[in-house]
Amino acid sequence: MSEYILETKNLVKEFRGFIAVKDVNLQVKRGTIHALIGPNGAGKTTCFNLLTKFLTPTSGKIFLNDHEITHEKPTQIARRGVIRSFQISAVFPQLTVLENVRIGLQRATGLSYHFWRSDKILRNLNGKALDLLKQVDLGEYANELTVNLPYGRKRALEIATTLAMEPELMLLDEPTQGMGHEDVSRVTDLIKKVSVGRTILMVEHNMKVVSQIADKITVLARGAVLAEGTYQEVSSNAGVMEAYMGT
Ligand code: ADP
């Protein structure tokens, strides 16, 4: 098996004549944290949407564990273990924190509602949901209504619901966006912790976070790969400086 869990070959996305993603060749190594960075409008979100097939590429190919997934449906890709973090808007605010994670677990089992209703299965799923919450330091919030969680903790819940889907490759979309220092450092530690035994591809604007946890960085600008490497390598690249200054 190749050392890359995910590879794209000349990925292109065109929106009515505008090329948002231009011949992108990504190589994400298994077991690493890989950051996708770049100025606004660089094509990061479009790339994520292509990888999960929320968007169909105009041309190019996507491979997961050497298997081409370019033409697969979003549900098939999720079943292969590529799970994108759920946005906060996708967690149910009026359910408890535990119930939100349990829903993720129920989806992962693929069992129908008849099975979830069984007390034994529910107890088992509740136990697993609590374990996941403890992993992301949300154990004490298990029975709180999700709507009452502080913002930073909601992002941790998002990570827990993603973990419930048993991801092999987690796609995190700006996991520290809008957070204060304390929450940023808590979520940074959390990502590092949950990366053990998994691969993480993340879009992240906070360069401190990227410098602390990313093994490899791909810099996009105007839809194309501008630079790649470690934080030291890309941060000393003149083209990267220019792309950021120019926005
Ligand atoms: P980033 O996430 O790096 O900020 P995006 O992937 O959101 O960048 O956008 C890349 C470019 O593609 C932007 O210029 C954006 O306006 C354009 N774009 C994104 N989605 C669409 C769409 N559905 N239709 C037309 N243009 C789009």
Image: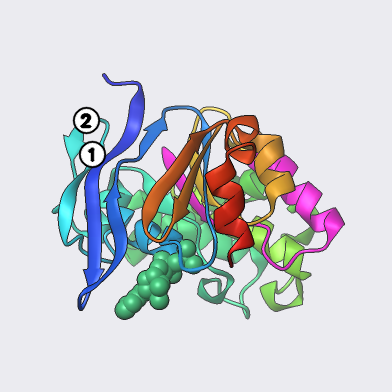
Q: Would residue 175 appear left or right of 40 to someone viewing this image?
A: right
State the extent of the magenta-drawn residues as a range. 166-192
Q: Residue at x 44, y 59 (%)?
A: 44
The answer to whether the residue labelled 1 contacts the one labelled 2, judged by CB atoms less than 8 Å apart, is yes
* Residue 143 marker: none
- On the question of residue 98 being in view, the answer is yes
Mark 1 falls on what kind of element? strand
Q: Position of residue 231 (x, y in %)?
A: 63, 35
- Is 80 left or right of 126, judged from the image as shown? left
Q: Residue at x 50, y 57 (%)?
A: 85
For the residue labelled by badge 2, is the local secondary structure a helix, a strand or a loop?
loop
In the picture shown, does residue 177 fall above or below 109?
Answer: below
Q: Amino acid at mark 2?
A: Asp
Residue 66 — which label?
2
Most foreground residue, 42 or 208: 42
Q: Amino acid at mark 1?
A: Phe
Please determine whether, in this image, residue 186 is positioned above or below residue 168.
Answer: below
> Where does the image place residue 37, in percent across and percent down from the top left?
53, 51
| Residue in the foreground of this view, choosing between 137 and 210 | 210
Residue 201 falls inside the magenta stretch: no
Could you classify mark 1 by the number of other residues whose Cα lies within 10 Å: few (under 14), some (14-19), or many (20 or more)?
some
**How many labels, in total?**
2
Q: Which residue is mark 1?
A: 63
> On the rendered image, what quadrant is the N terminus found in?
top left
Disc 2 under 8 Å from ligand 1? The reply is no
Ligand 1 sits in quadrant: bottom left
